[in-house]
Amino acid sequence: MNHAKYNTDFNADISHSLCPSLVELYEAARKQIEDLAFKPEDREMAQQIAMVMAGMAQLPGDAAVRIGRETLPAYHVQQVYELLKHEHVEEIIRKYRKLTYRVDAVKTYLRTMLYNAVFEAVARLENDVRADLPEFFAE
């Protein structure tokens, strides 16, 4: 594995090794998403999500990663994951719990949800504002 290409914020605190362990990456991801700030009933799911993030961080940058129907280089997904915050993970947990169908490939599904969360956050906020205050956006 080529870990030298790996460079994300949630690994910034790990300076003693070029190849941080999964446990170190997991702890850094937990810190990034502020897992202890989740409601007790959401904390276990948040920690599972942190493990998915850590697994992604451990991949070599040129590894192929399935995100939805696309295959992307791991370094691209890792860069997007750097932007994840507590609020993104709250939304992921909320959406995941609303699912009414069985998810067989949970890790792959969560990877895609994490990736999409960064892109959806701004659009969702704008949509909420427009829905709540339509009189300000009438044409």
Image (tube, rainbow, N blue to C red):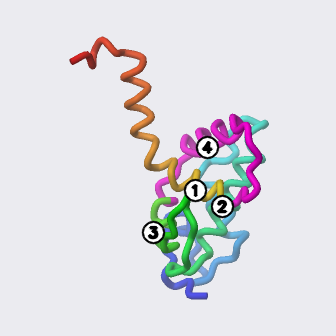
Tell me, yes or no, whether the two marked residues, 3 and 4, touch with CB atoms within 8 Å.
Answer: no
Q: Is residue 88 left or right of residue 128?
A: right
Tell me, yes or no, whether the two marked residues, 2 and 4, touch with CB atoms within 8 Å.
Answer: no
Judging by the rendered image, the residue that carries numbered circle 2 is 108
Residue 129, quarter of picture:
top left
The magenta span reads 81-107
Tell me, yes or no, whether the two marked residues, 3 and 1, touch with CB atoms within 8 Å.
Answer: no
How many angstroms separate mark 1 from mark 4 (CA)? 10 Å
What kind of element bears circle 1?
helix
How many angstroms separate mark 2 from mark 3 (CA)? 16 Å
Closer-to-camera residue (84/104): 104
Q: Residues within 10 Å of mark 2 (few under 14, many from 20)?
A: some
Judging by the rendered image, the residue that carries numbered circle 3 is 76
How many angstroms separate mark 3 from mark 4 (CA)? 20 Å
Judging by the rendered image, the residue that carries numbered circle 1 is 112
Q: Is residue 123 magenta?
A: no
Q: Is residue 63 left or right of residue 52?
A: left
Residue depth check, mark 2 versus mark 4: number of the one nearer the observer: 2
Q: Is residue 23 left or right of residue 73?
A: right
Q: Measuring from the top left, give residue 123's x and y in whole percent.
A: 40, 38
Q: Residues within 10 Å of mark 1 (few under 14, many from 20)?
A: some
Vertical order, 12 against 83 (above or below): below
Tell me, yes or no, whether the two marked residues, 2 and 3, touch with CB atoms within 8 Å.
Answer: no
How many angstroms separate mark 2 from mark 4 (CA)? 13 Å
